[in-house]
Image: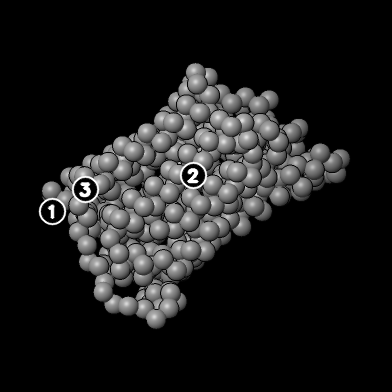
Amino acid sequence: MEAKFRKYILLWLSQSVSGLGSSMTGFALVLWAYGRSHSAMSVSMISFCNYVPYVFLSLFVGNFIDRHKKKTIMLVSDSIAAGGSLTVLAFLLAGNLASWTIYIVNMVIGVTNAFQQPASAVATGRLVPEEKISNVSGMNSFSDNLIVVFSPMLAATLFAVGGLPLILVLDLASFLFASFVLMFFIEIPEHVERKTYSSPFTGIAEGFAFLKNEKGILYIMLTMALINFFSRLTYENILSPMILARSSDNSIVLGIVNASMGIGGIVGGAVVSVKKESRHKAISIYVSAALSFLFGDLMMAVGKNALWWSIAAIAASLPIPFIMANQNAILYRKIPAAIQGRVFAVRNAIQYSTIPIGIILGGYLADHVFEPFMCSTGKAAGLLGKIVGNGTGSGMAVMFLCTGICGFAISIASCFNHKIRNLD
């Protein structure tokens, strides 16, 4: 068992290197897209095109994941995603890179993520002892947020040295390194099913049948879908345009705020990776979410400089590792290993189905509702202006105010659901 866990640590480290390369590319492309259009919608579309195929396909890939080798699925998925980065590089070098190119590439990456993420989740369960699942969630949060801290700074430095082509080349190099480690050094124990299915809907039905008997887990997924909706209205696509708009397009300020968000996640992840499991896992999920909305979103709304935005970013991100760790601890204990692929795929479809809606709606509301509203001379706009300030970006700040209130209310209300409380 210890040998398998050491293998997981090697996998975690190599995948983190690959994640750093992808994150640098993502940061550079957001700056590129917003710099061309100065539209929140242009940033929203990048994420939207990634999530839509991911959510849709998640419904159908569960039995495929359970019936095939997780290592092969991960390698093929990552290879196709790397092909997307290579395509962007080719268009860039040819001088033909356009927003639609990035949108199409992100759709392809969304397809690969629909296979890669549940396969990776099942692989984690195969390699990690049950008692270390919550610690591993903390490790993942730690590495993910360490990437958030360093990728903007590295991307900005590398962009100044060699431009976007250099960043894309390093992204591809990080993929090759991670794939080499996975291919030659990682063995994932398999429990591959030989059962055949008459249609792809059979696996979906089995996943939902499990959730029908485990109402507490189903309610967690449904409430997390609501929480994801409100968080994606702002953080996924509005944060970067708002900071750039309110800082005179200062990418350094944006990098500082993104780094601060990563610092909060690093601290939270480090604590989760070493602490004992919570005795009240289900309640801890929603208390953590409530604190994130209360102190993160509301402070982000009223902040008017890099210091306040950075404090808000730390407050928003620090509780996130506790949400993920407690949710994963519940899922891995409750879901039988033989059907984890199906249930995780259905979980992804349910829990993340609201993300593309939040992303595209957030971009539309920012450009066509809240920003024009805050430019008006009405009394309501004047009152809100006293809270969040005036000028370009104030409408997006009002959006953070709204998501903070709504997200906090939903999180607290979820604590009182008796099916969820019974999971403790």
Find residue 209 and report its image quarter.
bottom left
Q: Residue 1 carries which label?
A: 1
As drawn, 309 above or below 3:
above
Q: Upstream in the sequence, badge 2 or badge 1? A: 1
Q: Nearer the viewer, mark 1 or mark 3?
A: 3
Residue in the picture at 76% in, 48% down: 369
Query: Could you say which is closer to the camera, residue 42 or residue 291?
Result: 42
Q: Which mark is residue 186?
A: 3
Q: Upstream in the sequence, badge 1 or badge 3? A: 1
As drawn, 279 above or below 14:
below
Left or right position of 204 against 191: right
Callout 2 environment at 10 Å: few (<14), some (14 to 19), or many (20+)? many
Q: What element carries label 2?
A: helix
Q: Which mark is residue 84?
A: 2
Q: Upstream in the sequence, badge 3 or badge 2? A: 2
> What is the three-letter code of the residue carrying label 3?
Ile
Determine the CA span between mark 1 and mark 3.
14 Å
Q: Residue 70 carries which label?
A: none
> What is the three-letter code of the residue carrying label 1?
Met
Residue in the picture at 48% in, 63% down: 57
Q: Is mark 3 on a helix, strand or loop?
A: loop
Left or right position of 305 against 24: right
Left or right position of 346 against 406: left
Callout 1 environment at 10 Å: few (<14), some (14 to 19), or many (20+)? few
Determine the CA span between mark 3 and mark 2.
25 Å
As drawn, 244 above or below 331:
above
Determine the CA span between mark 2 and mark 1.
37 Å
Position in image of residue 273 (x %, y %)? 28, 44
User: Taking the image as drawn, is residue 334 in sight?
Assistant: no
